[in-house]
Amino acid sequence: MNKKIAIIGLGKMGLNLGLNLKDKSIDVFGFTDTQEGIDFARKSNFLTFNTIDETIQNFGEEKRIFWLMVPSGAVDDVLFSDKEGLVNKLKAGDIIIDGGNSYYKKSIERYNKLKERGINFLDCGTSGGVMGARNGACLMIGGDREVFSEIEWVFSSVAQTEGYSYIGGAGAGHYVKMIHNAIEYGMLQSIAEGVNLAKNGKYKEVDMNSLLKVWNHGSIVESYLTKVLEKQLEIYPNLDEIEPIVEDNGEGAWTINEAIEEKIPLSSISISLFERYSSRGNDDFGNKLISLMRNGFGGHEMKETNISKK
C-alpha cells in the first residue's frame, strides 16, 4: 500500500515537516488557505491544493491521514466549522494528527468528539523548531496506542533517531509538550540571569560572546539554548536595539495551573513566567505603590517625576 499523508497548514513548521517526509519518499501533499502559504510551498516544489476537497480527493483509495500544523486557536475551526470543517468530509477510520501546541484538555475534548464519528485523533507535541521539522523533530504522541502503531511510520520518518515516543492516552502528547515548553521558560530565565550578572557584575570587561563560546565547549551548562544565544549575539551585538519585552504563548500559565491543581511545586517555572509579565510593565503600578509605602512608613527615598502632592 502506498503511504500518503496530507499536511494541513503550510507555514514554516508545516511545510518543513512536509519536505522532511517528502525526502523519505512518502507521498505527501498539503493544503493551506493563504496565498502566501501556497506560493511558499510551490516554490519548494511541494504539492499543494487550494481546497480541502481537492486535498481529500488526492488520497484516492489510500488510507487518509491528516497532520494539522495550525495555531492552537484555529484547530476547532479547521475540524468543526459548519461547512468546511474537516470532520464533515471524513469517514470512519480516517486519522487526524494535531502537531501544534494545543492545550491538552482541548485535545481530550477533540479526541472524544471525533471518536463519536469513528475518526481517530492523535495529539503530537512537536519540538525542535523549524530546523527540527526539516531535519529531524522530537515528537511526543498521545491517543490510542493501536492508532499510533498503525501509522508509526509517519513519526519514525519525520523524527530524529530515537526522537519520538508514544506517551499515553488522549491528551498525553500535548500534556508533556506543555510541560516541556514550561521547562524552556525556566531554562531561558536562568541563562539570561546568569549572563546578565556576568556582564554587569564585578568584572565589566567580560565579553559575552567569548564567555558563551567557552561555555559551549564542554561545560555543564552547555546546551542548545546557550548555543542559540551565542549565535544570536553575533547577529545582534547591540542589545540597545532590542526591547526588553518577553512574550509568552500560554503554555507556562497552563503548566502552572496544572501544578496548582495537582499540588506539585513549580517554583522556578512560575517565577520565570511572572518575570515575562514584569517585562511588559505589568508590575509598574505595583512598584509605585511599594515605593509610596516605604516612603510613608520609613521616610525612604522615593524617585519622583513631576508629581504634585495634594
Image (spheres, grey):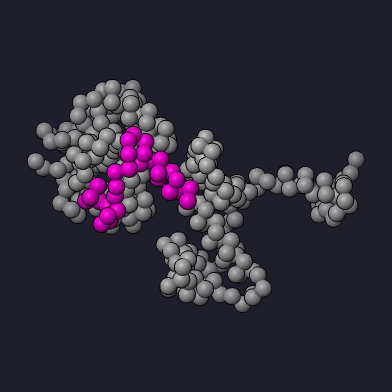
The quadrant where residue 68 appears: top left
Magenta highlight range: 155-183
The reply, left or right, for residue 246 in relation to residue 161 is: right
Q: Report the residue at 13% width, 36% height from top.
A: 62
The reply, left or right, for residue 187 in relation to residue 130 is: right
Q: Where is residue 171 drawn, in percent x and y? A: 37, 36
Q: Report the residue at 25% width, 51% height from top.
A: 158
The reply, left or right, for residue 65 in relation to residue 280 is: left
Report if residue 173 lies within the magenta region.
Answer: yes
Q: Report the residue at 55% width, 56% height from top.
A: 189
Q: Where is residue 41 drawn, in percent x and y? A: 27, 48
Q: Where is residue 134 drawn, in percent x and y? A: 29, 55
Quadrant showing the N terminus: top left
The reply, left or right, for residue 48 in relation to residue 172 is: left
Residue sitting at the far left: 1
Numbered label tally = 0
Closer to the camera, 79 or 275? 275
Closer to the camera, 94 or 78? 94
The quadrant where residue 241 appears: bottom right
Residue sitting at the far right: 310
Q: Report the residue at 15% width, 51% height from top.
A: 25
Q: Can residue 98 be seen from the camera position used here?
A: no
